[in-house]
Amino acid sequence: MYTGATIINPEASNSLNIFKIDKDEYINEYKKLTKIVHKNKGNIIMQLTEIGLNLESGKQVLYGPSKVKNPFFDEISNEISKEQILKVQDNFAKAALRAKKAEFDGIEIHSAHLNLLSQFLSPEFNKRNDEYGGSDENRAKFLVETIRKIRKVVGEDFIISLKLNSYDGDKYKNGITENGFLTACKLAEQNGVDIINVSGDWDQQKPKPKNPMFLQATKKLAEVVKIPVVLLGGIRDIETMEEILNSSNIRYFGIVRPLICEPDIIKRWKNGDRAKSKCITCNGCSRNHSTTCVLNKKKNNIY
């Protein structure tokens, strides 16, 4: 299992009220979580993120690869300097080491959904003409260097997972390309990533894609890398997963909303009840940043 996004920057705003791992003082608290998971014979990976929102002199300061309009706010991002890039990479490495000390089984680098690392991979936002821009390989340099720094501090026996966009959304005509996506993934594999979760901005895509949402991109990726790739987005039934297993190199699936709707769905499937998930993909849980499903009156205390 994966946690939700966890902030690595000690200066970052936490307006979304999500997990943080920017200080050593959190290590012992997280151990309580990992011990529960391991006691129940599970594994847990902490997802690390840098969203590009910083606090400076009491004001929120946005930064991105270049001076372009930020995808989340109606203002222009500041271009991040090379010194700041190194600081972000160090924050990732320090956070990964804290996660290891807290006895997580691994970490995931969140480079999707147009956060800072995701913007670097996208020609829509990355207009740089230095070594971090101008080509698919250069746009992936920030990510590759981050992977190397994390691997150096956590060692070889600790899982590094990667989540990244295969598609930035119809709104962004110059978003990440198929070649850019595959190039970043291949470089990630070469530099120490163990697992890749394929994501993207499904909400803007028109017409809406058939579920699973990122099937074609994940199929292509599974043909060019040797490490496990995870298909996610709209998976709701056993039959679909079996069909994909029998027709592609994909061997792993990720589900989230069905678990919020039915926390015992995996056990139900395992015990022979193969009925489709009750989740109707209304996204009420996502919009409300909640672990409660609108179909259930009882709160699901997943975390």
Image: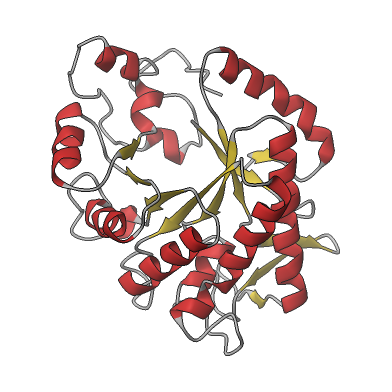
Percent x, y of residue 240: 16, 35
Confirm whether residue 292 shows in the render: yes
**Residue 174: image location, x then y, percent:** 37, 78
Q: Nearer the viewer, residue 104 or 194?
A: 194
Name the outermost residue toward the top. 271
Side (left or right) of 95 relative to 109? right
Q: How does the figure colour the protein chain or chains?
A: secondary structure
Above or below, 51 against 66 in this view is: above
* Along the viewing direction, whichever of 25 and 90 lies nearer the viewer: 90
Q: Is residue 106 above or below residue 222?
A: above
Residue 294 visible in the displayed image? no
Taking 292 as reference, is 148 left or right? right
Q: Nearer the viewer, residue 48 or 192?
A: 192
Q: Quadrant of residue 284?
A: top left
Picture mark count: 0
Q: Is residue 74 left or right of residue 103?
A: left
Q: Looking at the figure, which quarter contains the C terminus? A: top right
Please tell me which residue is depicted at 25% across the width and 60% down the height of the picture.
220
The residue closer to the viewer here, 59 or 39, is 39
- The residue sitting at 43% across, 50% down in the picture is 196
State which quadrant residue 179 falls in. bottom left
Instruction: Please give left or right for residue 212 compared with residue 232 in the image.
Output: left
Residue 283 location, quadrant: top left
How far from the left and from the top, in percent, is residue 250? 27, 45
Q: Residue at x 24, y 32 (%)?
A: 236
Residue 63 x, y percent position in the rendering: 66, 70
